Image: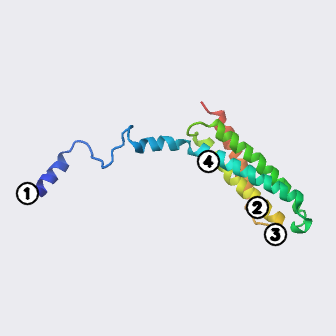
Amino acid sequence: MLRNKVFRVRLSAPTPVFLFPLRQDTPYRKRIMVSSSLIPRLWRICGALFAGTGTIMGALTAHMPDANFGAGGRAMAHGAMEMQMWHALALIVLGLTTHQKPARLLAIGGCGLLLGTVLFCGGVYYTAFSGHHAAHVAPTGGSILILSWLCLAVGWAFRA
C-alpha cells in the first residue's frame, strides 16, 4: 500500500524535486560568487611568484661561475629571465585590472600566459644550465605565449 502512494506522488509532482535546491541566499551560491574572482587572484599570485623566481634567476645568472652553464648558457638564462619578468608584470597587471570573472578570451589569454611562461622559460633555463636541448618545450611555450597575447588583444578589442 505504501509503495503505491509513493509511486503516485512521484507521478503527480508538477515540478522536479531536487535534494539541494539552489537559492540565491544559500551559502553554496555565495561560495560560487566569491570564487568567480579566483582566476584574477591566481594571475596575481603566479605573477608575483614569477617575479620572485625571476629575481632569483637574475642573481644566479649574474653571479654563478661560467662552469655551471652550458655553451652560451649565461646569455640564454638572462634572456629567459627577462621574458619571465615581463610576463610576470603582465600577469600582475591583468589580475589587478580584472575585478570579476573575466571574459572567455581574456581567461584563455591569461591562463595561456601562465602556461607559456612556465614552458618557455623552463625550457630555456634547462638548456642554459644543462647544455642539453629540451625538445619542443621552449618553442611550444613561445607559441602559447604568442597565441595568448593574440587572445588578449581580441578579448580587449571586443570587451564591452
Residue that appears at 90% across and 62% down: 72
Q: Is tag 2's residue or tag 3's residue first in the polypeptide sequence?
A: 2
Residue to which mark 4 is pinned = 42
Q: Is the residue under label 1 in contact with that under label 2 (CB below 8 Å)?
A: no
Where is residue 13 shown, x and y percent of the image?
20, 44
Q: CA distance from mark 4 to mark 2?
A: 22 Å
Residue that appears at 85% across and 55% down: 78
Report the front residue among 53 and 143: 53
Where is residue 1 shown, x and y percent of the image?
8, 57
Residue 40 location, quadrant: top right
Report the front residue among 76 and 52: 52
Q: Amino acid at mark 3?
A: His
Position of 145 relative to 99 (above/below): below
Residue to which mark 3 is pinned = 132
Q: Quadrant of the C terminus?
A: top right
Q: Is tag 4's residue or tag 3's residue first in the polypeptide sequence?
A: 4
**Residues packed near mark 2 inside 10 Å, few (<14), some (14 to 19) or many (20 plus):** many
Residue 63 location, quadrant: bottom right
Q: Is the residue under label 2 in contact with that under label 4 (CB below 8 Å)?
A: no
Report the front residue among 89 and 136: 89
Residue to which mark 1 is pinned = 1
Q: Amino acid at mark 4?
A: Leu
Q: CA distance from mark 4 to mark 1?
A: 57 Å
Q: Residue furthest top?
A: 160
Mark nearer the viewer, 4 or 3:
4
Residue to which mark 2 is pinned = 123
Q: Amino acid at mark 1?
A: Met
Q: Is the residue under label 3 in contact with that under label 4 (CB below 8 Å)?
A: no
Q: CA distance from mark 2 to mark 1?
A: 71 Å
Q: In this figure, which colouring scheme has been used for the structure?
A: rainbow
The local secondary structure at tag 4 comes to helix
